[in-house]
Amino acid sequence: MHRPTGDAPTALYVFAAASSEVWFNGHRLGANGQPGGSKTTETPGRYEASFPIPERMWRSEDNVVVIHMSSFHSVVRLDSPVAGIMVAPYPWPSRTVQVAIAFIAAGALFAAAFGFGVIYSLRRTGSSLALAVMAGVAGLQAVLESLRSLVPYAYPVHGLRLVGIWILAAAFAILLVAYVVSRFWPKARRPLIVLAVAAVAATGFAPGFDLKTALALMVGLALSAVVAAVAVHRRMPGARLLLVYLVAFIAIGVIFPSWLVDLSHFLFALGLVLPLLMAEVVRLGRDDQEREVALTRAAARPNCLTVASSRGVERVPLSDIVAVVGADDYVELRLTNGRRMLHAARLDRLEQDLPASFLRVHRSVIANLAHVRGFERDGGRGRLLMDEGAPLPISRNRLATVRDTLDEPELFSG
């Protein structure tokens, strides 16, 4: 090799999951760990090593580098255990800016995870839990991505770090799909989450951990974008902005795949969860105010349910409610004449507030017994036949209670 141009000091850099020993023009530059012929004779070195080259060792013509390497302590098999060997100016350029951005993003993501965790403890909503875990996973990945620039770790740690990064990226992708589909397409939640898990798991067969990680993230972004596109077609609020955001990061992932893995993924996660956290806090405040108004009005009309929805507050007679079905942060009221309404309330709270003529028959269903016309078995389970709409499922553990309740005709008076 030839000496790089310029007057700056030079060094030979070795990035590899191996121990190494280096000679330059017949002179030993040093060792990173101690290469050996077996696991017992090798001492693991660092994943990144630098060997400064004294200026006097350079020849005007060809220079000869000899590197002796061994790798008996690797945790996983890598397709490219030697990431790079090069001569460059010494010392290596600082990565302070990239590390600072990653750690600021990680701190903000952990704060968001804490915020959504608090909201989940108060509301017990699936979306809050998914966003809390999503933010925490992205924060952990930001820390792992920055570890290489902060800690001169031994090369066996590198394999564990790569596996951890891929697992965290896979978890983030699945959680992203779960959140988006639960919000915009709940009826397709189970098949789409199963599809996301299968597609993300398949990325484990891709060569190279950078490719595995990038593909896992792209699977999550692509499936979420499909769901958001369906929501845009249905003119659901918030879907258009989310779709634009997802498509922008898919474009970044295609054009600059290394950015997606090393940096932009954390900024994407941060840009997604922080606005959602602020919106959730604002919504909680509004919900509390609406509940106070609703409770006041409900006291004056005990035979009505005060429904808080995106259109405002409306009083619905209890006799018009056929069933109440849980829908994450909301419940769906199934009314007579086929009408349906969303109500900003939790199913557990409604179960306590509704009269005895309403019975919890499933973890996500409360039935108005005044509209029950029969009962039938469905395998080992049961179904309530309603005078309007589709039959309602009955959980196995509630089957006996439902049958006993149906034998008490006074509850059917409404």
Image (cartoon, rainbow, N blue to C red):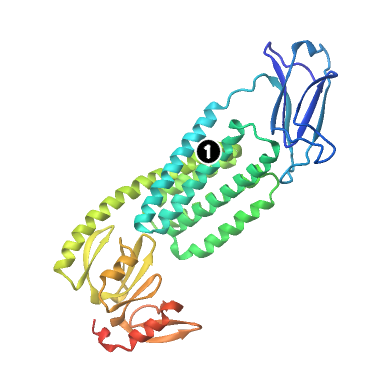
**25 and 37: which is toward the camera:** 37
Q: What x and y, as percent, mark residue 251?
A: 54, 42
**273 and 24: which is toward the camera:** 24
Q: Is 199 positioned to the left or the right of 406 in the image?
A: right
Say above or below: 220 vs 70: below
Q: Residue at x 42, y 81 (%)?
A: 399
Q: Amino acid at mark 1?
A: Ser
Q: Is 122 positioned to the left or the right of 393 in the image?
A: left
Q: Quadrant of the N terminus?
A: top right
Say above or below: 161 vs 69: below
Say above or below: 94 vs 253: above
**173 and 247: which is toward the camera:** 173
Kindly state the secondary structure of the residue where label 1 is placed.
Answer: helix
Q: Residue at x 18, y 71 (%)?
A: 302
Image-quadrant location for residue 287: bottom left
Q: How many neighbours does mark 1 have within 10 angstroms: few (below 14), some (14-19), or many (20 or more)? A: some
* Residue bearing the label numbered 1: 264
Q: Is residue 233 visible?
A: no
Q: What x and y, as percent, mark residue 20?
A: 77, 30
Q: Residue at x 50, y 53 (%)?
A: 175
Q: What x and y, as percent, mark residue 381?
A: 47, 81
Q: Quadrant of the C terminus?
A: bottom left
Image-quadrant location for residue 400: bottom left
**230 and 171: which is toward the camera:** 171
